[in-house]
Image (cartoon, rainbow, N blue to C red):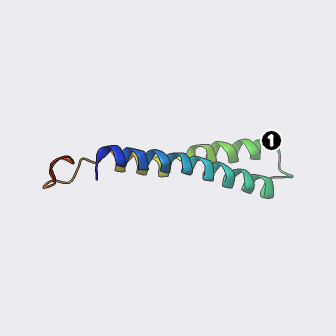
Amino acid sequence: MPMRLKKLIGTVLLVALVIVYALVATAVATARLAESGPLVHLAFFLFTGLLWVLPAMGIIRWLMLPPRPGKGPAGTR
């Protein structure tokens, strides 16, 4: 896969991850934490604010993988 295409896919995946994750975290907070105190809100948003980093690290790690050996440059087909 050409590196430019891989970076485009990775960028789209990261943006989609952040948007979907924020919407899901907000929906869960709205449904479950409506009557909770401020410390519970702080703990929840601190935890969920850091949790999205794990899947993002996987996407970034995939982006940083070198091309597979045996494949020529993209322009030499």
Q: Residue furthest right?
A: 35
Q: Amino acid at mark 1?
A: Pro
Compare residues 55 and 18 and report the one nearer the observer: 18
Tag count: 1
Q: Residue at x 34, y 43 (%)?
A: 4
Residue 71 seen from this side: yes
Whole-percent x, y for residue 13 in the image: 49, 51
Observer-nearest of 9 and 42: 9
Q: Please report the residue visible at 83 percent of the width from the left and 45 percent of the height from the top.
A: 37
Q: Position of residue 27 (x, y in %)?
A: 74, 55
**Apparent side of residue 32 relative to residue 71 in the rendered image (left or right):** right
Q: Which structural element holds mark 1? A: helix
Q: Is residue 51 visible?
A: no
Q: Is residue 7 above or below residue 69?
A: above
Percent coordinates x, y for residue 63 in the rendering = 35, 46
- The structure residue drawn at horizontal position 76% and vertical position 42%, both measured from the top left corner, is 39
Q: Residues within 10 Å of mark 1 (few under 14, many from 20)?
A: few
- Tell me the residue that label 1 is attached to: 38
33 sits to left or right of 5:
right
Q: x, y (%) of residue 48?
A: 63, 48
Identified at 55% across, 51% down, the residue is 17
